[in-house]
Image: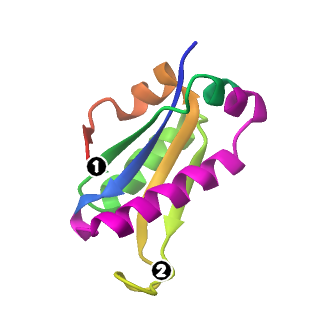
Amino acid sequence: MSYKQVILVREDLKLPKGKLAAQVAHASVEAVLESDKTIVKNWRNEGMKKIVLKVKDLKELRKYMQFAKDADLTTALITDAGKTVVSPGTITCCAIGPNTDVDIDAVTESLKMM
């Protein structure tokens, strides 16, 4: 069985590269902290595969996050503090997993890479 994590990023925010990287890192870490420890161990042993995917806006981000929750996958929604680029409370991204490739693909396979 193979594992991965995906991070969905809002394309409409047009985040600068550094801000985008920080938000993706926040999402990844937060999701791992909420994950089953056995899954995390297996995922780490395989190299901790992460894929960043784009969603067009907040509505689409929430839609895919709900699909993931409905599939009983780990999720982590990131809300920015607003100290640099975006307003306080702006939802920037969402991590899904780590979980199995098959389970995550069932939710996110139609999305494109960032």
Residue 104 lies left or right of residue 52; in this view the side is: right
Q: Which mark is residue 89?
A: 2
Amino acid type, label 2: Gly
16 or 56, nearer to the observer: 16
Q: Is residue 58 above or below residue 107?
A: below
Instruction: Give the SS element for disc 2.
Output: loop
Q: Earlier in the sequence, mark 1 or mark 2?
A: 1
- The range drawn in magenta is 12-41
Instruction: Give the SS element for disc 1.
Output: strand
Tally of numbered tags:
2
57 or 33, nearer to the observer: 33
Residue 80 lies left or right of residue 55; in this view the side is: right
Q: Which mark is residue 91?
A: none
Report if residue 35 lies within the magenta region.
yes
Q: Is residue 111 above or below residue 78?
A: above
Q: Is residue 14 above or below residue 54?
A: below
Circle 1 sits on which residue?
Answer: 54
Amino acid type, label 1: Lys
Q: Residue at x 26, y 40 (%)?
A: 113
Q: Residue at x 37, y 34 (%)?
A: 108
